[in-house]
Amino acid sequence: MRWKVFLSCVTLTLAGCMVGPNYQRPTVAAPPAFRAGEPQPSQASLGDARWFDLFQDDTLRGLIQESLQANYDIKIAAQRVIEAQGQLTVTRSGLFPQLDGQAEAGRNGTKSPIQSWAAGFGSVSWEIDLFGKLRRATEAARADMLSVQENQKAVMQALVADVASAYFALREIDAELEYVRESVKTRQQSVTLVAARMEGGVGNELDLDQAKTLVQSAQAELALLERAQEQTENLINYLLGKQPGAVARGKSLIEQSQPPQVPSGLPSTLLERRPDLREAEQQLIAANARVGVAKAAFYPSINLTAAGGYQSTDLLGIASRTGFAYSMGGVVDLPIFDAGRRSGNYKIAKAQREEILIGYQKAIHGAFRDVSDALAGYQKTREYSSSQKLLAETLRDQSGLATKRYEGGVSSYLEVLDTERQRLTAEQTLAQSQRDVLTSLVQLYKALGGGWQ
């Protein structure tokens, strides 16, 4: 008889309907191609590449690998995944019967002591999920867990981009320091030259003061760059979960490899690749399922209960004086009047779903913009860097020529002063543009959904 009741309940549960809307991905119009992208985009995308393949500097690879193991944000994200998995287990447990075991023993210390004991499975309870309330809640918890897992990937992606960008910034500062230190030496030689000319009656004190000013300005800039260098090293160590200290160097800026082609892929595939968009969609799935949970609250719920066990009044005569007792029952909860509580919860759930839907659509359009901005940034910084390289080479030649003209007495030291300043500025700007090319490549890689693989 008990098995017939149990099987009947299972049949009712399996046949129960699921109230609430089933999730369908919202239709978002995707452009046929990214602006500033390929004229005829292909399925291939830079975002499909692994970060280990994109960055060919072994030192940078080591830093990224270390950060993925020791970074604090990565550790926090991992714990959030475990937390979400536990919450899913808790929510899903409501779909199954709950069984508690109990055991009791007692003694009455009268003239005729009575010893008693009781043991059994205590109580069994099970809510029959006729209208899908528990299944919708489990659906929401599962989507929450997947959302947290996607967030973990997004954290990894951001960390890879941050470490690479900080490393390229450090190598740019190194390049600037090299230019400035070389300039300090050149300017100190100019001071010696001007002083010798003044002793020979050819130069004047103003030229000497101007030459010394050039040295002092370069030394001041050197101090600022050394400060920036140390602070950037501290940033990298922070991303690696380490104490401040020196950072190993690998290839210089000009030695860093870049892919010969940077395919952007189809805009429609961005939704499947970017972890932040997948995270937003899972949040939408969870919100949609919670609408079903709120709607199921309008329908009746059935709870089955049972209890049973063995008991005896004589611990020494258990075999002959025990008996089995049990009870079974059920409770039907019929919503009649709650002063609008269920209606209010349903309205809240629907509004939250619409809010998350709008946020999801906004995130998609923001992703399209990110890629278009990154494509334009990468292309234009490359063009700018090429032009800046030609400018720096021209100014180096001009600076050398101005020095020779001054030594020959053809021009004043003012010409040397002006060309030297322009040369150093152009070389520093060149280093910055070379850094910008690499960081814009990193930003494009991230915008296309790469970096977490």
Image: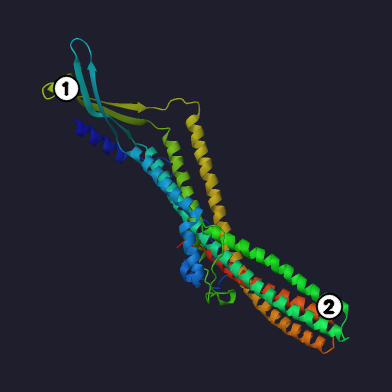
The residue labelled by disc 2 is 208
Between residues 44 and 168, which one lies in front from this camera angle?
168
- Tell me residue 171's x, y (percent): 60, 70
Q: Nearer the viewer, mark 1 or mark 2?
A: 2
- Tell me residue 429's x, y (percent): 69, 72
Q: Residue at x 75, y 84 (%)?
A: 398
Find residue 192 and name its label.
none
Instruction: Sort mark 2 into few (<14), some (14-19) or many (20+) by Cα contacts within 10 Å.
Output: many
Q: What secondary structure is found at the residue carrying circle 1?
A: helix
Between residues 94 and 18, which one lies in front from this camera angle?
94
Find residue 315 and name its label.
1
**105 sits left or right of 157 in the view:** left
Q: What secondary structure is found at the residue carrying circle 2?
A: helix
Between residues 308 and 280, which one lies in front from this camera angle?
308
**22 sits left or right of 229 in the view:** left
Determine if residue 143 is in view: no
Q: Which three-letter amino acid code belongs to the residue tagged 2?
A: Leu
Q: Residue at x 74, y 72 (%)?
A: 218
